[in-house]
Amino acid sequence: MFFKLIFVEKLIAMFSSTNSASNPDSEKILENISVDCVIFGYDENELKVLVRKESVLFNNSIYTEWKLPGNHVRRNETIDATALRILKEQTGLEKIYVKQFMVFSDPDRLKKRNQDYEWIKPRLIDDRVLTVGFYSLINIKDIDNSLLIEDAKWTNAYDIKELMFDHKEIFDEALLKLRYDLLHDPIVFELLPRKFTLTQMQRLYEAIFNTVYDKRNFRKKVGKIQYVIPLNETQTKVPHSPARYYMFDRNLYEQTKRDRFDFKI
């Protein structure tokens, strides 16, 4: 990841010296570098992703299309700052988990479909745009969804079949990276409430991996994780036997980890 960041920053420096004299917009943005964000949310035992609507005029007809939130990098900001700005502008959120995962550099990535390219072409100064993919994690119940931009919506991640440009490829790669990271880093707790039950934790893993785990095996695995702490507190006002609450102790994790978080079941 360190070398990838260096590579991206070198690209920014290279592209920032082009087209600046002839384009007033180039004083504000880097025409050839953008950021696209795959914003994962979790709600009602479903993995969701935030997409935004565009009305695309093509051959005298208007098509409703969906894309990932994204924008160009400004000349006065880092790649990471661009991702945080996009999240703030389109969700109203700050200080949430965000991670860079891949650079997408196909020269024709904006030309996958004619209708998409014809729609975006008048807005382009240069049609060769590299984009840096980030993903972020949000517990939808913890946010004010009224702060979302008007044309954005949460949709079930497994209902996404097609997006504009190469955004379906970006989404697919983000989901693969999220699943890998969940097995090696304790990021799952970004999507759980501060106090959670083991059933809630299992359902979250099942939603992200689109599978079903054996309850006994899952709990046996969690029981070996010393930084998932059982609390002397149980659920109340539930129509079933109340379950015990647990909490992730990040300080203990940082103190006791040897190699990496390992949650292969």
Image (cartoon, grey):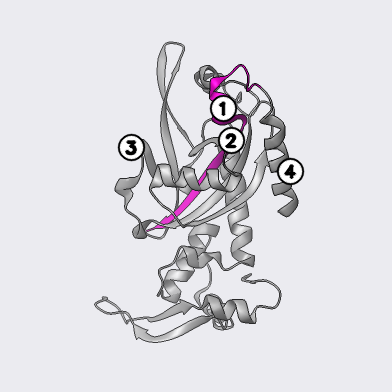
Q: Secondary structure at mark 2?
A: loop
Q: Would you place residue 167 above or below residue 38 in this image?
A: above
Side (left or right) of 48 relative to 165: left
Q: At x 46% / y 63%, what residue is drawn?
A: 191
Q: At x 69% / y 34%, what residue is drawn?
A: 105
Q: Which mark is residue 234?
A: none
Q: Which residues are magenta?
A: 19-43
Q: Nearer the viewer, residue 22 or 108?
A: 22
Q: Are marks 1 and 2 in contact (CB under 8 Å)?
A: yes
Residue at the disc numbered 4: 7
Gap between marks 3 and 2 measured at Cα: 27 Å
Tell me the mark number nearer the camera, choosing from 3 and 1: 1
Q: Are marks 4 and 2 in contact (CB under 8 Å)?
A: no
Q: Earlier in the sequence, mark 3 or mark 4?
A: 4
Q: Earlier in the sequence, mark 4 or mark 1?
A: 4
Residue at the disc numbered 2: 75
Tag 2: residue type? Arg
How dense is the environment of label 3, judged by Cα within 10 Å: few (below 14), some, or many (20 and up)?
A: few
Residue at the disc numbered 1: 27
Gap between marks 4 and 2 measured at Cα: 17 Å
How dense is the environment of label 2, judged by Cα within 10 Å: few (below 14), some, or many (20 and up)?
A: some
Does the magenta-highlighted stretch encompass residue 255?
no
Tell me the mark number nearer the camera, choosing from 3 and 4: 4
Q: Which mark is residue 150?
A: 3
Tag 1: residue type? Glu
Tell me the mark number nearer the camera, choosing from 3 and 2: 2
Gap between marks 3 and 4 measured at Cα: 35 Å
Gap between marks 1 and 2 measured at Cα: 7 Å
Gap between marks 4 and 1 measured at Cα: 22 Å
